[in-house]
Amino acid sequence: MAKHSLVIVESPAKANTIKKFLGKNYKVVASVGHVMDLPKNELGVDIDDGFAPKYVVPRGKQKVLTQIKKDAKNADEVYLALDMDREGEAIAWHLEGYLKKTQENIKRIIFNEITKSAIKQAIHNPTTVDQRKVDAQQARRILDRLVGYQISPILWQIFYYGLSAGRVQTVGLRLVCEREAEVAAFVPEEYWTVDAVLLTKEGEEVPAKLTHVDGRKAKLKTQKDADPIVEALKKSDFRVAEVTRKERKRNPQPPYITSTLQRDAARVLRFSPKKIMMLAQQLYEGIDLGKTERAGLITYMRTDSVRVSPQATESARGFIKDTYGDEYLPGKPRVFRQRKEAQDAHEAIRPTDVVKTPESVKKHLKKDQHALYELIWRRFVGSQMSSARYDTTEVNIEAGKYQLRANGRVLRFPGFLSVYQEALSEIEAELPRMEKGDALSAKAIEGNQHFTEPPPRYSEATLIKELEDKGIGRPSTYASIVSIIQDREYVVKEDGRLRPTTLGEQVWLTLEGFFPDVFDTSFTALMEEELDRVEGGQDSWQKVVRDFYEPFRIALDHIDDRKDRIKSSLQEETEVACEKCGRKLIKKWGRNGQFLACPAYPECKYSRPLEEEAQSLRLHATCPRCGGKLVVKVGRYGRFAACERYPECKHTEAYPIGMDCPEKDCDGQVVEKVTRRGRRFYGCSKYPKCSFALWDKPVATVCPACNNPYLAEKTSKRRGVYLKCPKCKEDVSLD
């Protein structure tokens, strides 16, 4: 007689959901993330022995593993129910290796959604750990460790202790810095357009634009080019030369993949990628839908595939027919083309049950959870609906040697737009009825000046799109790339756009000088393809790591030849004289940013804070006194926020780090503060109403072990920068 079966998952939330589906003969426990990892206080990779990794049990995990081992010993069989990506496969592999001496009957189960039917089906169709996925994850982990642990100390020597560099995150920083250079180098060019409002015989208005002069496309560079045309058109007769009417269709977009979900949720809901993935994880792992029901509301949220199961497609089509009618249902199911680079390992992101409408589950969800679920639900349902249909009209108008054009579009059938609006607003304009040969008169004609715009700075959403287009990273890494470069203060978000800080720009210039090939975008994309080849079985993970490390090692060996030159190039000389010896002070780096110091150090130890407008980045806040923008300033005790209208307005306040206070029911912001003795700490802007305070910098990342809403940033000489949960003491690596 069987005792019971043990099911192991990653998180307590996922365990609670699966418990609801399995009977009393199953025990479900959580590993609380990784159970084995590379050591924190050393490289942990034997370079001379085929890059063999040294895995250890992370601090605080031995107790969890001991209990799992005890549960496995008392079980009849063990099911490894970890996520179906490479990360989950690696956890399953480590658990299998740890438990196999205790329990021989270990099985791997995979599922794309956490529903009763999916879990039951997975239990009845167990498989084994996919070693190729494990190898691909192991290669990535080792590559990232080799880069992070061997490059970060170089940054400490040039800037200050505690900085770090990541293999893929640095490429994200590179893109932001290169776009900033494009913006700085951009020279706007003037151009003009001629816009007209014409009238039909019935007095109806027709907005039109000049398009051609003497059959050639109009190119007006200055007002001198535009003014004669405006005057000539005011005296001209207008005649309709051609009217083209067509019906156009607009097809729905495919269901979300990770990158498109992050882009849309950032655009529509104004959520950060980190927050989007946190909410999606909660919707995937399970939500209580009453006293007796708990289920995952969406499928697995890390995917690059637009594929949908036939069962889910038919369910959506049945819902559309019953809810909207036959006209909204296309003749056959829609199938979307995959991107060439897509791995197609998992389905697209969709609701697990289309009948669970956003309105029906709203009372069970938090506000942000509901907003994201509604976006996913609407996109999926809309993807299987009929096309929207428009009547479009194009009218070409002649006035002597000048040609103008008017365009109109009217929505005749909404189709999928009834459920999912792709744009924030649909602009519709209907032109009055006109026929070829109709005469028009001028109501208003004017020339308008314009200037070409520089390429826009990246938003979080557009940076993710650029990473995806260039093949940098994978669905599971996009959010971390964007958040880490901000957490490290290499990049700030200003008016919704990403801008490199002075530190970020100089860190990138340093890394580019030392490792131009390692952080090349095409090289990084090639490495992702190599990891895919490992998963596909075409290459061994050792070969991929070796091919990367050999040129990397050569670059490391030549660092000393360039270190002093690069370091001195970053120490900019100023016109400020040293108050002790008279030498011109130079800009140097410290924990609080740049400061001024005497170049004769250590003979002369004079230094002072750096106060200049270049450090005054705008914040997402306004001055409570005058309504002006708040900017970042650097003073004697580090950074603070001040009104940009200084000295007219002298308002100052503590520097906000861009994180909401984690205390329940508090609407304050976490700010940087300094004690009377000059020690920096972090507290709530609503103090003394809210007493939240922390010595270490808090980061808005949910603890994978206990779901605490934030982690603390720690730094040590051996381990570099890492995160630690102040509640359960779980360590989270950043490399």
Image: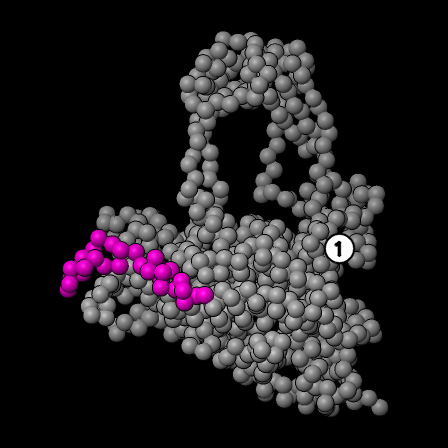
Colour logic: one colour
Give left or right: position of 648 versus 7: left
Residue 313, position as x, y percentages in the image: 79, 54
Q: Is residue 663 positioned above or below 410 on the image?
A: below
211 in magenta? no
577 in magenta? yes
Residue under the image location 50 percent in, 57 percent down? 516
Question: What is the span of residues highlighted in magenta in the rendered image?
Answer: 558-586
Residue under the image location 25 percent in, 72 percent down? 676
User: Observer-nearest residue: 22 or 540?
Assistant: 540
Count all numbered tags in the image, as a single digit.
1
What residue does disc 1 label? 307
The quarter of the displayed image where residue 651 is located: bottom left
Residue under the image location 73 percent in, 48 percent down? 383
Give left or right: position of 371 versus 151: right
Q: Is residue 63 positioned above or below 108 on the image?
A: below
Give left or right: position of 128 versus 726: right
Where does the N terminus fall, quadrant-wise?
bottom right
Q: Dot 1 lies on which element?
A: loop
Is residue 712 among the parts visible in the rendering?
no
Residue 595, position as x, y percentages in the image: 28, 61
Is residue 55 among the parts visible in the rendering?
yes
Residue 237, position as x, y percentages in the image: 56, 8
Q: Amino acid at mark 1?
A: Arg
